[in-house]
Amino acid sequence: MIHKVVKNADDAIRDIPDNATLMVGGFGLSGIPENCLAALLRKGTKGLTCISNNAGVDDFGIGLLLKTHQVRKMISSYVGENEEFERQLLSGELEVELIPQGTLAERIRAGGAGIPAFFTPAGVGTEVAEGKETRTFEGKVYLMERWLRADYSLVKAWKGDTLGNLIYRGTARNFNPMMAAAGTITIAEVEELVQPGELDPNTIHTPGIYVHRIFKGSNYEKRIEQRTVRSIR
Amino acid sequence: MLDKIGIAKRIAQEVRDGMYINLGIGIPTLVANYIPKDIHVILQSENGLLGIGPFPTEDKVDPDLINAGKQTITMVPGSALFSSAESFGMIRSGKVDLTILGAMEVSEDGDIANWKVPGKMVKGMGGAMDLVASAKNIIVAMQHCSKDGASKLLKKCTLPITGLKCVKRIVTDMAVLEVLPGGGFRLLERAPGVTVDQVRKATAGRLEAHDDVPEMRLQ
């Protein structure tokens, strides 16, 4: 009997130990696993390595865990908009590895696809290339990049079923599908949790095989970083 | 001299019907506002969307729909959504026709530096390195000189590089220039009121500039 449904975020993250490596879905604050991040804050899990495109803002997303010094290392492509992050980075409390965004996405995809390394042109001739193997294919130089995998992947989807099949919404998809596949244990939080058969199999983004635990999240804030609107003409 | 909107308007003239375009944060984002109405292009957002529409009206704001600058956006009819891996797959494989991005420095070989100032807070490269490594056509939007008057069009970049030999064309507050295949800048147009001599003085890298270079025409 497949049993993936857990009560809530606290139950879902119960066994994440100190010093674990986590993948955390989202781009900016869009598509982040709000409930799991709040549960990690409550539990006080320390020494975390977080693989996430961004590091949240001062008082939301991964920013909350930075404030309480629960994060030891960030692996990201862009970490602006966060003063506490900047302070900890400059004081040496926090370690940061910056990776080109497409390389980050592909390293995670490779991790979930069983491909230990691949070649990309991004970063050739830059400090990103330092210490990395390069090879020339058809006259162009490429860098070898290795897969990324995680002890736990925390992803956020719009809808999911009890077998772990997931559907994302809008640009909240971003890094979530690759991270779902690259986690040793993948925890999905969803806005709507339904029974098998209720989601159209044609529309599934993440097949349930990648998801180990799933729960219906609550009180989604879905904070907006840059609220930009036009007036009605 | 052009202001930011002037630079955006001039770059919009480089856009051709049917192009798939990636716009960077800042001035490049403004370009979308000045693309002629009879030209149909599709804008790519690196966080997983083809078909960026205008900013939403207040009642249509959706936290699940943002652009690479984390601004709320809308989708045009015929949009497609996808993951970040697929997004950079289409970038890496050269499907995006035109990339417009900002820069801190450009060298006469077409090298670009736009992600890091040593000693200052490092925010990261985001998607810039992936874009410049693979784009078929890159236009850079930038100020010709820094606030203290130093040229940003150099023989060699002094800041950490984002990508090598990738910039094709540059639109600054003073001029439109192209990077020659063998190296060096060529002046194509002057901004209104700017002389060829002023461009020569403001360009530290090798510059090919005829005295009769035309002034750019803006609407």
Image (tube, coloured by chain):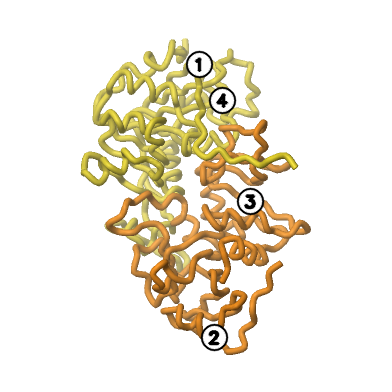
Chain colours: A yellow, B orange
Residue that numbered label 2 is attached to? B209
Front-most of A161 and B17?
A: B17
The secondary structure type at the circle numbered 4 is strand
Outermost residue on the bottom side: it is: B211
Q: Which residue is mark 4?
A: A158
Between tags 2 and 3, which lies in front? Answer: 2
Name which residue lies at 49% across and 60% down.
B102
Query: Looking at the image, is mark 2 or mark 3 earlier in the sequence?
Result: 3
Q: Position of residue B64 (x, y in %)?
A: 57, 33
Q: CA distance from mark 4 to mark 2?
A: 56 Å
The chain under label 4 reads A
Disc 1 and disc 3 in contact, CB within 8 angstroms: no
Viewer-closest of B42 and B133: B42
Whole-number angstrom distance, CA of label 1 to CA of label 2:
64 Å
Dot placed on the residue nearer the N-terminal end, 1 or 4: 4
Q: Characterize the local packing of mark 4: few (<14), some (14-19) or many (20 or more) Cα atoms within 10 angstroms.
A: many
* Residue identified by numbered label 3: B43
Measured Cα–Cα span from mark 1 to mark 3? 34 Å
The amino acid pointed to by label 3 is: Leu
Q: Which residue is mark 1?
A: A216
The residue sitting at 53% across, 64% down in the picture is: B141
Against A208, is A91 above or below? Answer: below
Name the one closer to the observer, B50 or B64. B64
Look at label 2 and name its amino acid. Answer: Ala
- In this view, the residue farthest toward the right is B38
Q: Quadrant of the C terminus of chain A?
A: top right
- In this rendering, the answer to whether B102 lies above or below A57 is below
Q: Amino acid at mark 1?
A: Lys
Secondary structure of the residue carrying numbered label 1: strand
What's the mark number on residue B188? none
